[in-house]
């Protein structure tokens, strides 16, 4: 997928004026937040689980090589295959190779963010395969030829009317000529249309929410049942998973599962939590004959060693998106790549390069809600600040802002200069603003005054007021 | 397999973790012990009346539940459920020996096999049922093909009282003691299929069963 994160400002401005998008986002926002809150209030152990989950992931990450090798040997022991891919290109080559090896013509897919990350669909289509997304949201955006705008609700930006139009346009070739406008009918039509795809696919590709080192199992957490039809009906099941998904034991996975659905959709458990371990056994009556796991690195082993390693705890629940005022206002597409919102603003620069995404860490008010709701306690605001520091160090910050920051830094480090300069400035602003009490326009602060007035200072600096009070506690 | 990729990823990880060699013996012994320990973390409190908790939690996720006093009453419960839902008495049933003891009426058309496209109603037993979350546990195997859990419109699961366990972790303990390793699939099923992908409104019956019906057999 092409990275268009550099166009964040223009895309965000367009998104704010997009009536359909704003309508869809307004419908979604409260629902996610309320459901999560209710689910968490009903689980007094939530905070304890949060710290347990953090410990489990930190332990696993600090022995990641051990657990990945253990996972690999257990998959092989259960009759499956493990492939390793450093880059999206390698991952696609492996998946296309497996499909080619079995003479596959059609592929069904369960929702997978790693699949989006490695852009597996175009790779398969270029190899002549038919690819069908089977998660309803993914199916809708596949028809619309759009990327997902949310990591768990990929079509959250679409209104019902837009889905109706898409189905009418694309389903007439299956003989569905009625215009379906009610949600039950829309869902039912997708169910009928996708049945054939499930039953005739040669290969099923899913992602994984977790990998279990102890048993070599891959876990998917879903609600629709499409993931299970995808990993049961075709003759070959391929799992694409990134390396940080591994946890040591089934008990470890269970602890984090208790956080995942609650944080994502406010469910205690999603409808289907499925553990896949190897291909069908000799006495099984159904299930795939081949089971492959493709382990994708794509920059994660680099993150492990730097100040962003905590990001590898992320379990992709989407809570940070749902609670982010910026995401809620502009939607996911403005972010310009696979992962939007706070987690995406950290991951995108790290995965595609800061020079291609340096606006994203700045598209944040540092209000801290993302960290508050993150089930894995990832310090997202701190990381966004660190990326801003990197941006400055790599000279990606616009020149005018660099100068401004340099002057301010120079002054702020020299209190004997800072205080007199500031008191002169404050005095000047006070005199200039005395008449109105506020400024409608200030040079160099247009971005601030464009949408609100700047109140004029009232006489003296904070530091002077502090000194005069003689005792900080009285202020 | 691309061995270069494997070796490079593992060595990049080791470098990131400031390790050049493989793990010290004492460390790998500790990791093996951790894996073998299967230690259980924080669990939600579950009241002691497991049957009622399981039923309440199942209903909360839109499953329908009936209780019958013994296996003998199961056919009647199935017939009644199918009749009320205007379904034909045609089912595809798991070749599970535990279902053999049930005296099914001759009026019901039963096939014992995996599910196919045409099947509307499936009947299965379960490996266990979890009171904590109202979850059914089904393991793939010769007696329990996975397609029965997902392809038909209606899935009827028969749960015996003594199969109801407290927490999710009890499933892992039970698998370790009763089976040799994990089956191909462990399905934790909590309610019927659903989606909220259109305007975040929950709609049942996306791709899996539209209805999840549970018959609890309340006999010792």
Image (tube, rainbow, N blue to C red):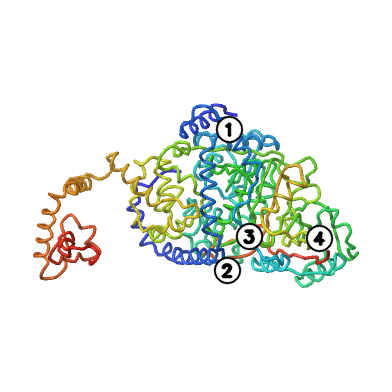
| Cα gap from disc 4 to disc 2, whole angstroms | 30 Å
Determine whether label 3 and label 1 are within 8 Å by CB: no
Q: What residue sits 18% from the left and 54% below the top?
A: A444
Mark 1 nearby-residue class (10 Å; few <14, some 14–19, many ≥20) = few
- Dot 4 and dot 2 within a common chain: no
Q: Nearer the viewer, mark 3 or mark 1?
A: 1
Q: Provide the residue designation for mark 2.
A: A182
Q: Which subunit holds the residue at mark 3?
A: B
Q: Which residue is the extreme one toward the bottom?
A: B84
Percent across and percent down for residue A196 are 67, 52
Percent across and percent down for residue A320 are 45, 56
- Dot 4 and dot 3 within a common chain: yes
Q: Provide the residue designation for mark 3.
A: B206
- Dot 2 and dot 3 within a common chain: no
Does dot 2 land on a helix, a strand or a loop? Answer: loop
Mark 3 nearby-residue class (10 Å; few <14, some 14–19, many ≥20) = many
> Image quadrant for the C terminus of chain B?
bottom right
Q: What residue sits 51% from the left and 51% below the top?
A: A316
Determine whether label 4 and label 1 are within 8 Å by CB: no
Query: Does residue B143 show up?
Result: yes
Q: Is residue A225 left or right of residue A422?
A: right
- Dot 2 and dot 1 within a common chain: no
Is residue A291 depicted above or below B133 in this figure?
A: above
Q: Which mark is residue B91?
A: 4
Query: Does residue B191 show up?
Result: no
Determine whether label 4 and label 3 are within 8 Å by CB: no
- Dot 4 and dot 1 within a common chain: yes
Q: Provide the residue designation for mark 1.
A: B26
């Amino acid at each position: 997928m092409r990275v268009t994160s550099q166009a964040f400002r223009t895309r965000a401005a367009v998104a704010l004026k997009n009536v359909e998008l704003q309508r869809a986002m307004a419908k979604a926002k409260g629902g996610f937040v309320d459901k999560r809150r209710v689910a968490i209030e009903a689980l007094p152990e939530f905070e304890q689980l949060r710290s347990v989950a953090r410990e489990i992931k930190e332990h696993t990450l600090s022995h990641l090589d051990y657990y990945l090798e253990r996972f690999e040997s257990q998959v092989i022991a259960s009759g499956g295959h493990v492939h390793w891919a450093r880059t999206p290109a390698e991952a696609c080559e492996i998946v296309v190779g497996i499909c080619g090896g079995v003479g596959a013509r059609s592929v069904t897919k369960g929702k997978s963010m790693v699949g989006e990350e490695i852009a597996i669909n175009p790779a398969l289509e270029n190899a002549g395969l038919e690819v069908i997304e089977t998660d309803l949201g993914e199916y809708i955006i596949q028809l619309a030829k759009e990327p997902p705008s949310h990591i768990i609700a990929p079509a959250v930006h679409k209104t019902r009317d837009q889905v109706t139009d898409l189905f009418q346009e694309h389903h007439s070739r299956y003989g569905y000529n009625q215009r379906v406008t009610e949600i039950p009918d829309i869902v039912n039509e997708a169910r009928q249309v996708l049945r054939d795809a499930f039953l005739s696919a040669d290969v099923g590709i899913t992602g994984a929410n977790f990998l279990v080192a102890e048993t070599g199992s891959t876990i998917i957490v879903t609600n629709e049942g499409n993931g299970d039809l995808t990993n049961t009906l075709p003759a070959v099941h391929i799992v694409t998973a990134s390396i940080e998904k591994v946890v040591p034991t089934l008990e470890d996975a269970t602890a984090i599962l208790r956080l995942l659905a609650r944080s994502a959709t406010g469910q205690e458990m999603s409808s289907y939590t499925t553990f896949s371990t190897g291909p069908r056994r000799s006495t099984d009556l159904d299930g795939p004959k081949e089971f492959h796991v493709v382990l994708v690195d794509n920059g994660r082993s680099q993150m492990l060693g730097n100040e962003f390693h905590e990001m590898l705890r992320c379990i992709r629940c989407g809570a940070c998106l749902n609670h982010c005022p910026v995401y809620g206002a502009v939607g996911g597409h403005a972010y310009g790549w696979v992962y939007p919102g706070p987690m995406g603003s950290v991951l995108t620069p790290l995965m595609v390069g800061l020079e291609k995404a340096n606006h994203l860490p700045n598209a944040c008010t540092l209000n801290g809600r993302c960290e508050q709701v993150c089930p894995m306690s990832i310090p997202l605001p701190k990381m966004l600040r660190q990326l801003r520091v990197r941006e400055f160090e790599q000279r990606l910050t616009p020149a005018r802002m660099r100068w401004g920051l340099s002057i301010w830094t120079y002054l702020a480090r020299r209190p004997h200069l800072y205080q007199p300069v500031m008191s002169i400035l404050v005095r000047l602003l006070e005199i200039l603003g005395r008449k109105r009490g506020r400024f409608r326009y200030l040079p160099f602060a247009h971005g601030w005054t464009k949408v609100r007035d700047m109140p004029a200072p009232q006489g003296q600096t904070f530091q002077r007021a502090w000194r005069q009070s003689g005792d900080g506690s009285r202020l | 397999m691309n061995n270069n990729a494997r070796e490079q990823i593992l060595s990049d990880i080791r470098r990131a973790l400031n390790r050049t060699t493989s793990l010290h013996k004492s460390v790998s012994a500790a990791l093996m012990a951790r894996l073998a320990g299967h230690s259980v973390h924080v669990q939600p409190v579950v009241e002691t009346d497991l049957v009622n908790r399981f039923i309440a939690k199942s209903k909360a996720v839109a499953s329908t539940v009936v209780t019958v006093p013994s296996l003998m009453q199961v056919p009647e419960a199935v017939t009644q459920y199918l009749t009320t839902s205007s379904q034909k008495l045609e089912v595809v049933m798991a070749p599970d020996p535990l279902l053999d003891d049930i005296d099914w009426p001759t009026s019901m058309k039963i096939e014992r096999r995996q599910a196919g496209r045409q099947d509307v109603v499936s009947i299965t037993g379960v490996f266990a049922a979890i009171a904590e979350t109202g979850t059914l546990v089904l393991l793939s195997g010769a007696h329990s093909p996975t397609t029965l859990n997902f392809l038909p419109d209606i899935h009827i699961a028969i749960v015996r009282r003594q199969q109801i366990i407290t927490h999710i972790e009890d499933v892992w303990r039970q698998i370790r003691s009763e089976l040799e390793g994990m089956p191909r699939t462990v399905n934790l099923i909590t309610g019927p299929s659903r989606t909220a992908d259109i305007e975040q409104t929950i709609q049942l019956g996306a791709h899996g069963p539209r209805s999840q019906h549970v018959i609890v057999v309340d006999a010792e």
